[in-house]
Structure formats: structure tokens, C-alpha cells
Amino acid sequence: MKRFFLPLLLFVFFTVESIFVQLLPSEFFYGKWILVPRFLIAVLLLLAMYGSQKYAILYGFAFGLLFDIVYTEIIGIYLFLFPLTIYLVMRAMKILQTNALVVTIVMLAGIALLELVIYKMNSFIHITDISMKEFANTRLLPTLCLNLIFIVAAFYPLKRYFEKLAEQEILS
């Protein structure tokens, strides 16, 4: 039973992202800001840092593919970017300390990297035509603020859960 809780938890965060977008109307901020919840990748990054990097990357592939199938027109963007983001953040964490502040900043950097690469890909294939400055002001900064709130709220409960799983060797 314990082995099924982690995939179920990740699926819940996958679903919460779309529910959050539906519940928060764009008129809430007068159409000025686009808030993109990246709760799933934040949870996967915490899993990689405090649980198992191997499982985080595997779940990154699986949920990246699911994300591509459900939300995007091109299969492969999230399938590639979720595991790559996890890998790059883990490489950075090998150098840095793992205190809460540093982990939060590195996670936000990973989310920013994900958003920037998606923006560049969409710009490259002409899905979007907004400037980088407009993207940064209307989407990137509000997205980082929203995800910072989520990370602060979810950090300690998820950290304790992933450390507990690692101790119980469910993730080994």
C-alpha cells in the first residue's frame, strides 16, 4: 500500500495544477499576470533532494509524458524537460548546502529554467510572439511568486515524508 501512495500523491499534484488554473480566473489580476502552477515539478525536485533521485527522474519521465499528452500539442517537451530539470537541480545541489533557503532558491531557479525553455520553444515554433521582457513581467515573475508560496507551504511536510520513505527504503 505504501508503494502506491507516492504515485498517487504525484498524480494529485498533477491534477491540482489544472484545478488551480480553473479556479483562479484570469480576470483576478485584471489580465496582467499569468500564474502557472508548477507544483508537480516542485514536488519532484523535493523527492530528488530528500528521497530518491532515481525515482524522481523516472516519475519526471512518466509525468512529463502525461503532461505532454494532456496539455501540449507536441509530445516530448515536458517528457524531456522534467527529468532534465531534476538532473540539473541535483547537480547544483551537490555543490550547495541543503538548508531550506538554498533548496528553495535552487528549486525556483529550476522552475525558472523550465519556464524559460518552454517560452523559447514556443517562440521558436511560433506558438507565442511576446517579447522576453513581456514574458518575464507577465508570466515568469508571477509564476515564481506563486510557486514560492507553494514551496514554503509544502516544504516541511513533503521533506519529512520523503525522508521517511528513504529511511524505510521504499524508494531504494
Image: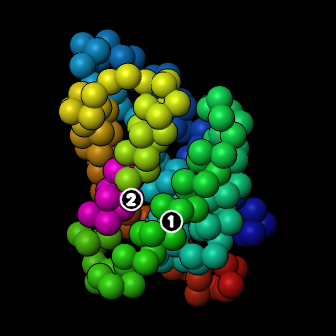
Q: Quadrant of the N terminus?
A: bottom right
Report the residue marked by disc 1: 86
**What x and y, as percent, mark residue 24?**
40, 23
Q: Earlier in the sequence, mark 2 or mark 1?
A: 1
Q: Is mark 2 in CB contact (under 8 Å) with mark 1?
A: yes
Q: Quadrant of residue 99?
A: bottom left
Q: Secondary structure at mark 1?
A: helix
Q: Secondary structure at mark 2?
A: helix
- Distance (Cα) linking label 2 and label 1: 8 Å
The reply, left or right, for residue 117 in relation to residue 83 is left
Residue type indicated by callout 1 = Ile
Numbered range of the magenta stretch: 104-112
Does the magenta run of residues contain 92?
A: no
The reply, left or right, for residue 53 in relation to residue 8 is left
In depth, the one of 93 and 52 nearer the eye is 93
Q: Residue at x 59, y 47 (%)?
A: 78
Q: Alpha-carbon neighbours of circle 2 within 10 Å: few (<14), some, or many (≥20)?
A: many
In depth, the one of 168 and 93 nearer the eye is 93
> With respect to residue 69, does 164 lie above or below?
below
Report the residue marked by disc 2: 110
**What x and y, as percent, mark residue 82?**
55, 56
Q: Quadrant of residue 172?
A: bottom right
The reply, left or right, for residue 76 in relation to residue 24 is right
Does the magenta run of residues contain 111?
A: yes
> With respect to residue 29, does 132 lie above or below?
below
Total of numbered circles in the picture? Answer: 2
The answer to whether residue 123 is visible is yes
